[in-house]
Amino acid sequence: MSDQSIFSKFTNLYSLTKTLRFELKPVGKTLENMKNNLGYDIDLQTFLKDQEIEDAYNLIKPELDKIHEEFINEALTLNEDSDIDFESYLMSTKSLIIVI
């Protein structure tokens, strides 16, 4: 009887990359200074300045999304760019390409 399991053909075949995530948390005097200067809401467990930024972002995001969508749609429907001849640009940059 073999030591290998029925899964041995499927395990350890590829390298595995793991991402480590770190978080910086203020402690001691730094935390105290931040609470005094930035304001801290115990109920929200967040700094008031961060909350103001988040609220402003949530307020303006739909309008920015609308503007962005209009910009993309307009750029995709323009026909004036379809007549651009890129051959001269390509020739001028061809000499810059380095083959390794």
Image (cartoon, rainbow, N blue to C red):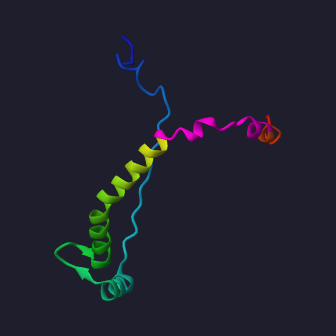
Count of numbered labels shown in the rendering: 0
Of residues 96 and 74, which is closer to you in this image?
Answer: 74
Quadrant in which the N terminus appears: top left
18 to the left or right of 63:
right
Quadrant of residue 31 in the image?
A: bottom left
For the magenta stretch, what is the residue range?
77-91
**Residue lying furthest right:** 95
Residue at 33% x, 86% y is 32
Query: Against 48, is 92 above or below?
Result: above
Query: Against 3, is 42 above or below?
Result: below
Quadrant of residue 82 in the image?
A: top right
Of residues 82 and 6, which is closer to you in this image?
Answer: 82
Quadrant in which the C terminus appears: top right
**Residue lying furthest left:** 43
Residue at 21% x, 79% y is 41
Q: Is residue 35 magenta?
A: no
Could you say where residue 57 lies in the image, as x and y percent from the top left? 32, 65
Could you say where residue 96 lies in the image, as x and y percent from the top left? 80, 42
14 to the left or right of 34:
right
Residue at 34% x, 16% y is 6
Residue at 33% x, 83% y is 38
